[in-house]
Image (cartoon, grey):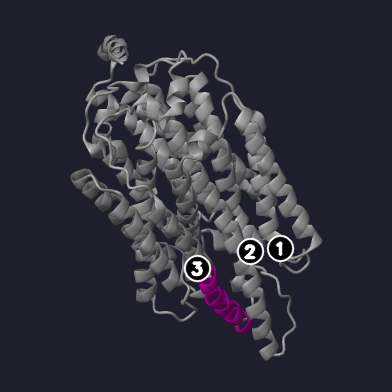
Amino acid sequence: MSSSVEAVTPRDPFAMTHREILEAMTGLLAALFTALLSTTIVATALPTIIGDLKGSQTAYAWVITTALLANAASTPIWGKFADLFNKKVLVQTAIVIFVLGSIVAGFAHSVPLLLVARVVQGVGMGGLTALVVAIIGSIVAPRERGRYSGYMGAVMAVAMSGGPILGGVIVDSPLGWRWCFFVCVPLAVIALVLLQRTLRLPTERKTGVSIDWLGAALLTGGVSVLLIWVSFAGKAGYYDWISTESALYVGGGLLLLLAMVWVESRAESPIIPLPIVTERTTGLAIIASIAVGMGMFGATTFLGQYFQTARGFSPTIAGVLTIPMVAGMLAGSVGSGQLITRFGKWKGFVVAGATSLVIGLGLLSTIDHATSLWQVGIYIALVGLGVGMMMQNLVLAVQNTVSVHNIGAASSSVAFFRTFGGAIGVSVLGSVLATRVGELSAQGFDRIGVQAGSSGGNLDIGALPAPIAAIVRAAYGDATGRIFLIAAGAAIVALLAAMLLPNNPLRRTIDIDPDLDPMRAENDEDDAPVGEFDGDRQKVGAGSGSA
């Protein structure tokens, strides 16, 4: 491999300086911040948005699910585009798509139009989240990447903590909920200008790379059919969980996914590389990541609704009340990352994170409409701590098992399934919540002699008479515990997967022996440029791989 190092050496004079990297990262992190903010800012605004648009609990969940689905489905496609086209042009294109979706969402006058806009936003977010990581990997040598990871962590923390609060402030202000979407537009434009001025990337085309459109379509179709099934099963006016319609939905979704596996096993450049995702560490990490996605997106989505609908707080206060979870995530990710870098041990932190997630979600399953807020704060802090200790460290464990040439594919696969797990989780938990709220509301109405439907109902609680509103609020509060009980069950699966992860020591080299990675042998035959892997085969600290 000495020839590889020699091939890289002439490119070093063209490497970006520390100052140039910081300038480029300003635009990249601004784009990443905008994408993350668009997700979190909606959390506390959704009850008001759905109430104003006369939507139901099912619509509430789908506003989140559609964006996550489009995000996850488009991420591997954006990754393939990064192999074919200029990354700078691609990330700018993703920003433009995101801006268009945000504008349409801000002007939406109905739930269906809002869902279409969220799909467009999700496609843009998928491009931003995938390309920002790819570009940073292209301008920063792997051995130097650790020094810049703190900036990304800070941006993620600010977006996660500031989004719900900002969304609440906007909803409570004269601007109204529509500015929760409009506010992202100027931020995205600023990111676009910064990238144009600071980011300079050569166009490095790879020959023989194709996009597996059929595999992407089958994957998206299969998961979408299953999401539609769980969104409407068990609801009045639709179909039962055990019915002919359910069998058709489940059977159709599974057939599409099986066809996807068949196509991926034969595709020249698959969207989901089966040899990578079926490796033991990666497979177990994917299982655990699905539960992490369910816990992270499910908790943030429905906690905002719990604080507003069940407890009667304003959107601003609801955003403030979610801070313990964000603090737990920050402490878990930063603290475990530093300790792993210092001691070189990772599995104990993943298992501890899964344990914290199980305990936190289990405790949240006990809450109702009268639970003390300090108790809820402790519970969600435990959930955040678990998510923080697991999310990045699972990616680190996967990266430790593959060649540097396959780190992108392996890491994006984990992120892909984590996002899909979040989409499925939000849809399933939203469906269960709507069904349970309908049951509890019907029982409450019967006690006061009022005839009412058993569906999720309209979320415009303020428009209801006081006695009816009190019953609906109590129903939401008492029903919320059940969805966290289901999430706790998923977290137990994640804990088992974490315990079964091979405790492989973190390697001190960037790359691994090609004989240990069959995918690497195939890639070595390609004409892919080696310049992106600056520092290949050089010794680094064990913690550098976590960047």
Residue 474 within the segment the image draws in magenta: yes
Q: Mark 2 points at which residue?
A: 431
Q: In which quarter of the image is residue 88?
A: top left
In the depicted structure, whether residue 539 falls above or below residue 354: above
| CA separation in Å, label 3 and label 1 | 19 Å
Contact check, label 1 and label 2, Cβ < 8 Å: yes
In the depicted structure, whether residue 190 falls above or below residue 464: above
Q: Residue at x 41, y 65 (%)?
A: 358
Q: Mark 3 points at which residue?
A: 484
Q: In which quarter of the image is residue 46?
A: bottom right
Q: Which amino acid, by three-letter code, is at mark 2?
A: Ser
Q: Which residue is drawn at 57% across and 81% down?
A: 470
The magenta-colored residue range is: 467-484
Q: Give the class, few, some or many, for how many residues have Cα within 10 Å of label 2's Cα (few <14, many ≥20).
A: many
In the depicted structure, whether residue 18 falls above or below residue 492: above
Q: Position of residue 289 (x, y in %)?
A: 46, 50
Q: Where is residue 174 in the image (x, y as percent from the top left)?
A: 49, 58
Is residue 351 at all visible to an observer of this figure? yes
Q: Residue at x 43, y 66 (%)?
A: 318
Image quadrant containing the N terminus: top left
Q: What element carries label 1?
A: loop
Q: Where is residue 93 in the image (x, y as percent from the top left)?
A: 52, 28
Q: Residue 233 carries which label?
A: 1
Secondary structure mostly seen in the magenta stretch = helix
Q: What element carries label 2?
A: helix
| CA separation in Å, label 1 and label 2 | 8 Å
